[in-house]
Every structure is written in structure tokens, then in C-alpha cells.
Image (cartoon, coloured by chain):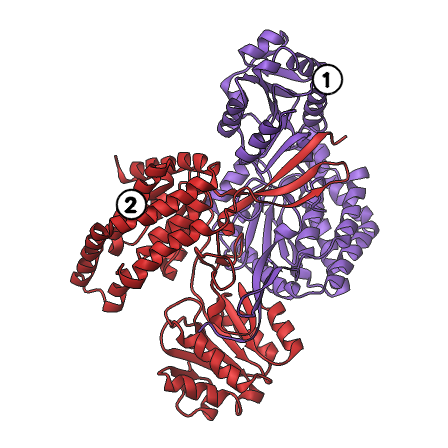
Chain colours: A red, B purple
């Protein structure tokens, strides 16, 4: 078979599996999750070998060590992956849940029932634990999943996929619920995103180039997990201590994630009072400050910021800083340069808190807390498949419910329309 | 300016308008709706002239009279259109509504706030009242709208668009909230569906060829309003009188709509008892019956059905009829040949009602009522922009809420993640 035929065939197998899965009881889906965790433990050694092969090949290719580390499936990452399966088993099944069930004037009961989306294609890079995490959530929500990981994690992903499928066979879940594409050919993506008769949703997770490519070529609906240029705005009334703590947590907790702080904005009335302390703390923590002119007046260590800095997703110990006239200017800046991801205001002013959270159209907007709360677990979704930067269907962190849709259910007793 | 430049420019104007609109108070949006209705009344004469020109040109081109009638903007259609504007004004504004507001263990309040989608492009055919209906709903939900109607209603659509924009200027709503494309060039669609930097959603309403074209070419998310091959399944225990009433209402109330009955399925145990009476009634109402072999055994007037009949959206006085072994076979038939639109079971059996509504993944599934309830007004949405056949974001009838999305809002008091 050609590459195209192979992928088409796999997608149709996933579609058939999704038909069975859509009506599968929660007990079987949970049994699969538990069994997969147990089987992964049993197969730890062979997976470690596959993973070692990926690491070795990456080093041979001269991949930078921090990126090689992202590929490693050991220690905490391994334990978290297994625990993740058991955590997803413990979550309530969204499928079949009926909400908004109301009686219409004619007596027909109308409600909305959650149903799976069908087949979900996930295109991702680097970390092989995504293979297990994503499969767990998609299948728990009643979907079949087609996984296309990066070539750098090929052997690990294949080994993980085999275990997930074997666990499916053990418990009577269709094996084709989880398909890991058996190729590293980039042309596979081009084929995959055109199979709209078999695949219902494509989620690209990775660099902006990948996301853009998928969005422009896919004939299947796409929910992108793209970059985050996240802002914290220190209002005139911001508490200085809280400002330091929120800026530090937002910037330093994890720097290479999409919800990390990238640009700090500050009201001009706080530029001489609150801002220097915040920047001093970050600078001492090793963060390079790139400021506008007014920032450099109050913090001499700041380097001059260029226009590019306002749109930069550094994912690194660099922070862009700008002093703005007022809340309007902060909102304007975020709208113009931001990526509609996560924006936080630090303020004691009620009206400004209201205006900031209402006027910005980003996926997460908040008052007096860290940008790091932009995360499915922290927001109470119970799990997270990623953070959507697409507005349609699911905007921001996505949990199990976001991997389903809703149909209308009508319970009548002979009603006619006329 | 070239066609492409013109459309690009209009889309950017819509985008700017949408930024103002997203934060606009409900009062101004409602004032626009009321003012638009009043201005339409005042402009009745000039709109009637524009409409007459469309009708004349259609007749000159030899368009069939039923299609010409769909273009006419008089009588009930005119009154319904004006009343529609006032009804939308009376609906609650979905924008800013916060749901699921919960306190997380660390004290951060997390909720989900409805926000507009941005700019919505609607591509439709024939009926010019869609121009007003769609604009009303999109703008009430805080979106700007770009309308691309059919060439056969060009003059009517232009006249209606001018009135809607003049009403906007009257009340301080941005005029570019409503843009009716000033061209009948089909190439305009090709340009429009690629403007993903300015447009957030494309809704194609019309023939399957149009919908397919838009889905395959658009780089903007698409919610399709495609065909409905709707089913009624008469279970073994179906009440005979109710079966006749539901089949008649589903087929005859309006035949040229997507929620009309197209295929009737019947359990073999009801084939000799319930089915003949149902088919006799429909046949007497002028419906041509195309049946499977077993149907023709119990109803001699039936013509033989071919395979094509199971996938046909007749929109006409023709009905495909098939006798099936049991509920499983009915579900299997609907999955195989249906379009996931609207499916109804007539039954007195509790288990079968449960199985039918749970197992089918169509946008509307129901028990003992007419397919004609698959409609935003009847389902209690208060309005309807159309019936989505796309699963993502909105599946089935779409109201105001479906023209918005949700962002997360966080109200903290200094919380950090660690």
C-alpha cells in the first residue's frame, strides 16, 4: 500500500472503532485506562529501550540537550503518565450527560446530551507522554484517536501505542480506538488533514509553523494549540508585594510553557513606586528586562525594547516591559500585540477589574492571580488535553467535556407541530 | 480596487467594527434592532422596488416560479422579518453571561464568560429575508457580519443592507457591523473564505455543492448548514394513530425544509398492522411511496425503492420506506444512509426509546414527536440562525448562544501557583 492508502485505511479503522466507542459503557473505558497503566508498568523495560533509542538518535543528530530531555520518559514523567491514566479513569464520563432538560409549553421535554466527536487526529511534537495523555482523554470521552507524534519520539510512541492497543484488546475495547501512525514521513500530515470523511477534529500541538500549516491545509475542523504572549498589567492601585509575587510566579514557575508571562505592562502612576521593585526581583532571578523608554528611566538595568519584543513568545528568561498611560492603553496594547491567550490585571480598583476582565477577548482573563492558573487542572476541568487558541468550540484550556459535542434529545408523547 | 482588495478592505472594516461591538451595551444593540425595524417600514416602498427588480430579472432568466416566489419579500414574509427584529431585541443578551462560577480550593473564583466570536461571514442563496434575520442575530450576539447572498436577490439584499447600516448610524452602532458584499461575482466567495486574519467563522447555507466548496476551500472555521435526510422509525409497539399523525406532520407540514421526513423505517412486526395505515394516509395526501420489497407486499401502490432512495433528500412529496428486522437494523440503516440531522422513534417501549436516543449520533434525536420540532424556536432557543450539520461548536439548531464562545474569568486575591 502507498503511504496515502495506509493512512486512509487506518483512518477508516478508527472511524469504525469510534462507532463502537460512542456507545461503550464507562466501566469498559475505565477498565482500559487501568489496564493500560498496569501494562505500561509491565512493559517499562521495553519502553525504556525504545525511548533510549530515540534519545540516542537525537543526540547523534546534534539535538540540543534541553530538547533531548523533553523526549526522556523516566522518573517523574513516567510516574505522572501512569498516574494520569488512573486520574482520567476516576473522572466522571461526560458522554450521555444531559443538561438544560426543560419542558416546552407543548409538553415535549427538550435536553442536550453530550456525545463524542468521533475521530480526533492529534499532531504533536517532542514529548512522547502526550501519546498516552491524549489517548486517555480522547477515548474516555468516547472518541477514537489517531496520533501523529514527532519523528524524534518515533520509537517511544510506537512502543506506547502497542501497549495501549494491547490493553484495549484485554478489556474488549476496540483496538483501533488508538492508532499511532507508523511513519515519520511528513507527507503523512498532508494526507491526514484531508480525510474529512473519516476524521472529525484535528488538534495540532507544537510550533507555530506546524499550526499554521495544518490550519491552512486541513479540510477537517482544527482546534489549534498555538503560542501564548501572556500579559500581566500592574494597575495604578496594584499592591506592590502582590505585584512582585504574581510577576515572579507568572514568569519563573515554568518559562517554556504557553501560559508563562512574556510582557509586563504598568500604569504610569505605579512606574516609580511598584515597578522598580518588581523588575529588581525578576532581574535578581536572572530575567533579562527589555523595557520601553519610561521603563528604562526607573530601572537602569533594562535594555531597550524593540517593536519585536511586544509580540515575542520568549519561553525564556527575558521579559518585555512597557509603561502605559492607563487601563485603556493596556487593553489596547494587549489587543494589538497579544495572542488572546492569558491576561492578568493586578489592581485594588473594582471598576478596573471589571473593565479588564470584560473588555479583553482572550481565552483566560483574571484579576490578582498568576498566569500559571491558565491550566485545565487549576481551572477545575479535572484534566487537560491542551490550551486552545481557537475561539470556536473550545477556547482556552480543554478538558474532557471539550472533547465532546451536544445533540438535542426530545421526549414527547405524540406532539405535532401543527 | 480589485475585487480581492475590495473584499479584504470590507473584512478589515468588519473586524474593527467587531472590536467596538464586543463591548457594546445591550441597550444600544436593541436600539439598533428596533430602529432597523422602523426604518424598514419607512423604506418599504424602495425595498419593494428593488425586490421587484430581482423578481423580474429572475423571470427573464427563466427561473422556475416556486423559486421566484422564494425571492419575494411581501405579505407574511415581510411582516415576519420586521417582527423577527423586534423578537431578537426582546431576547436576553448572551454576551457577558457568566456560568459555572465556582470557587477553587485556593480561593480563586473561576467562571466562564460568553463573548462574541468576532466577525461572521454568511454565504447563502435565494431568500433575501436571511439578510435581515442573520444580521439581527449576529449583531445581537456582539459580532460583525459579512453577508454574501445569492445573485438572484442582489438588489433586495443591497437595499436591506443600506437600511440596516443607516439604522446603525442612527443609534451609534458601528455601520460596518453589517456589510453586504457589493458584488455577485462568485469569485468573491473564494476570496472571502481565505481571510482568516479578519473573519472568525463562515456559515454556508444552501445547496450541498456550495457547502462542500466552502468546506474544502475555507481556511476559516466553517459551520455548515447542509442537507437533512431525516428518519421516523415505527417500532413494533408504535401506537398506530400516533404513527399516522407523526408521519404526516413530519412529511407534510413543510416539504422543502431540511427537517422534513425523507425515509420511514418500520419494524417488521408492525409492517402488517401499523404501516399500511400510515402509507395509505400519506398516499392519499399525494405522497409517492418508494418502498423496499416488504413494504410493497403490504402496500401495493408503493413503487420499488432503489439504493439511491435511502440517501435522497427529496424536499418533495416522495417518501422512501423500508421494513427492518428490529431496532438494531433501524439504527444501522440511519447510521449508514442518514445525514446525522433529525431522527424520531415512535414507540411504547421504554428500553427502545432509551436505546434509540442514546445510540444515534444525529443532531436531534427524539421519541414520539414530529421531526418538525428540529427548529431553534421549537426547541426553546428563542431564535435560529440555522441548523448546523457540523458537529463542532454547535450541532443542530443554533440560537444566539451558539454565535458566541466562552472565555475563562478568574477572580483572585493574590493567589500563586506555587
Q: Is residue B210 above or below residue A83?
A: above
Q: Mark 1 Cα within 10 Å, few/some/many (few <14, many 20+)? A: few
In-image side of A32 versus B363 (left or right): left
Residue denoted by label 1: B285
Q: Are marks 1 and 2 on the same chain?
A: no
Q: Residue at x 80, y 54 (%)?
A: B39
Q: Which quadrant is home to the N terminus of chain B?
A: bottom right
Look at the numbered disc 2 and give the secondary structure of its residue.
Answer: helix
Numbered disc in front, either 1 or 2: 2
In-image side of A299 versus B356 (left or right): left
Q: Position of residue A102 (x, y in %)?
A: 70, 43
Q: Residue at x 71, y 37 (%)?
A: B71
The chain identifier of the residue carrying mark 2 reads: A
Q: Mark 2 Cα within 10 Å, few/some/many (few <14, many 20+)? A: many
Q: CA distance from mark 1 to mark 2?
A: 60 Å
- Residue B205 can be seen in this image: yes
Nearer to me, A370 or A9: A370
In-image side of B2 versus B131 (left or right): left
Q: Quadrant of residue A412?
A: top right
Q: Is residue A128 above or below residue A282?
A: above
Amino acid at each position: 500500500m502507498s503511504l496515502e492508502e495506509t493512512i486512509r485505511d487506518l483512518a477508516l479503522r478508527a472511524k469504525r472503532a469510534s462507532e463502537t466507542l460512542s456507545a461503550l459503557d464507562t466501566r469498559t473505558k475505565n477498565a482500559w485506562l487501568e489496564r493500560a497503566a498496569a501494562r505500561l508498568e509491565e512493559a517499562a523495560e521495553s519502553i525504556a529501550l525504545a525511548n533510549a533509542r530515540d534519545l540516542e538518535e537525537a543526540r547523534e543528530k546534534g539535538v540540543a540537550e534541553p530538547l533531548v530531555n523533553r523526549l526522556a520518559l523516566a522518573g517523574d514523567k513516567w510516574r505522572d503518565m501512569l498516574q494520569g491514566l488512573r486520574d482520567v479513569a476516576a473522572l466522571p464520563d461526560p458522554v450521555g450527560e444531559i443538561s438544560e432538560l426543560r419542558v416546552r409549553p407543548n409538553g415535549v421535554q427538550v435536553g442536550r446530551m453530550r456525545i463524542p466527536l468521533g475521530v480526533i487526529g492529534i499532531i504533536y511534537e517532542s514529548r512522547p507522554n502526550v501519546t498516552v495523555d491524549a489517548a486517555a482523554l480522547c477515548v474516555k470521552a468516547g472518541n477514537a484517536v489517531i496520533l501523529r507524534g514527532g519523528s524524534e519520539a518515533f520509537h517511544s510512541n510506537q512502543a506506547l501505542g502497542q501497549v495501549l492497543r494491547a490493553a484495549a484488546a484485554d478489556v474488549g475495547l476496540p483496538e483501533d480506538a488508538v492508532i499511532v501512525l507508523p511513519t515519520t514521513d511528513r507527507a503523512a500530515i498532508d494526507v491526514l488533514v484531508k480525510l474529512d470523511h473519516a476524521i472529525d477534529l484535528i488538534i495540532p500541538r507544537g510550533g507555530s509553523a506546524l499550526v499554521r500549516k495544518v490550519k491552512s491545509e486541513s479540510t477537517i475542523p482544527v482546534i489549534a494549540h498555538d503560542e501564548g504572549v501572556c500579559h500581566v498589567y500592574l494597575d495604578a492601585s496594584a499592591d506592590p508585594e502582590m505585584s512582585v509575587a504574581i510577576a515572579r510566579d507568572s514568569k519563573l514557575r515554568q518559562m517554556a510553557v504557553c501560559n508563562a508571562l512574556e510582557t509586563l505592562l504598568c500604569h504610569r502612576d505605579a512606574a516609580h513606586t511598584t515597578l522598580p521593585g518588581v523588575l529588581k526581583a525578576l532581574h535578581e532571578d536572572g530575567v533579562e528586562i527589555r523595557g520601553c523608554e519610561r521603563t528604562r528611566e526607573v530601572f537602569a538595568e533594562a535594555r531597550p525594547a524593540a517593536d519585536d519584543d511586544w509580540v515575542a513568545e520568549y519561553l525564556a528568561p527575558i521579559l518585555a516591559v512597557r509603561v502605559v498611560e492607563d487601563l485603556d492603553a493596556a487593553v489596547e496594547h494587549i489587543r494589538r500585540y497579544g495572542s488572546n491567550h492569558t491576561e492578568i490585571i493586578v489592581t485594588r480598583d473594582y471598576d478596573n477589574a471589571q473593565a479588564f476582565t470584560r473588555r479583553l477577548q482572550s481565552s483566560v482573563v483574571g484579576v490578582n492571580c498568576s498566569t500559571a492558573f491558565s491550566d485545565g487542572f487549576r481551572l477545575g476541568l479535572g484534566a487537560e488535553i491542551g490550551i486552545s487558541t481557537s475561539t470556536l468550540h473550545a477556547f482556552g484550556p480543554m478538558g474532557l467535556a471539550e472533547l465532546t459535542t451536544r445533540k438535542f434529545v426530545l421526549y414527547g408523547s405524540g406532539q405535532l407541530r401543527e
